Amino acid sequence: MAFTGTYTPKLDDKGRLTLPAKYREDLAGGLTITKGQDRSLTVYPKAEFERIAEKADAIEWTDAAGRAFIRNFFASSDEQRPDAQGRITLNADHRRYAGLTKECVVVGSRKFLEIWDAEAWYAYQAAHEDDYSQPQSDALKSIF
């Protein structure tokens, strides 16, 4: 399953967000929400979260940056199962971290979904348009 597309659900007063209908079946078995990059939240399907967790097991506890990553990543993780309407509940810490208001954007990022505050997402897109339209890294150049 590849998560793609952009969706604009609203956050309700109870902190619930409805996931895109096309992904509900893939996430019905469980998911994990974590702090993501650039002040977004990341929604991992259960298997993808486990894959990352296993890789994290290889990080040496004596590695200060690795320790910081492990602490932040796992401390911010919230396992959930969407309800019958495909809603997940975003806890207060996650909402605060991502600056979420009522207007949200859910973005497919191939192996996971990202949840952004709508205003932050549009600002991010505007700030990084050149990064997309004129790739500089060798890895990106090799795709096209």
Image (cartoon, helix red, strand yellow):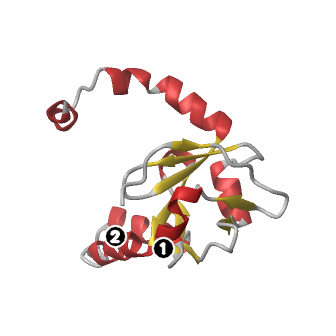
Q: Is residue 104 above or below residue 92?
A: above
- Look at 53% across and 42% down and name the residue there: 6
Left or right: residue 96 versus residue 133 is: right
- Look at 73% across and 43% down and name the residue there: 103
What label does residue 28 carry, if any? Answer: none
State which quadrant residue 63 falls in. Answer: bottom left
Which kind of residue does numbered mark 1 sit on?
A: Phe
Who is closer to the viewer here, 109 or 5?
5
Find residue 100 and report its horizontal and vertical position in percent. Answer: 70, 49
Element type where label 1 sits in the image: helix
Left or right: residue 12 versus residue 55 is: right
Who is closer to the viewer here, 57 or 104?
104
Q: Are marks 2 and 1 in contact (CB under 8 Å)?
A: no
Q: Residues within 10 Å of mark 2 (few under 14, many from 20)?
A: few
Q: Which residue is mark 2?
A: 52
Find residue 10 and report its horizontal and vertical position in percent. Answer: 74, 49
Q: Residues within 10 Å of mark 1 (few under 14, many from 20)?
A: few
Which kind of residue does numbered mark 2 sit on?
A: Ile
The alpha-carbon separation of the residues under discs 2 and 1 comes to 11 Å
- Look at 65% across and 66% down and name the residue there: 86
Who is closer to the viewer here, 65 or 13?
13
Q: Which residue is mark 1?
A: 74
The C terminus - image quarter: top left
State which quadrant residue 19 falls in. Answer: bottom right
The N terminus - image quarter: bottom left
- Mark nearest the camera among 2 and 1 is 2
Find residue 18 and report its horizontal and vertical position in percent. Answer: 67, 59
Q: Is residue 52 above or below residue 23?
A: below
Left or right: residue 92 versus residue 35 is: right
Find residue 115 and report its horizontal and vertical position in percent. Answer: 58, 51
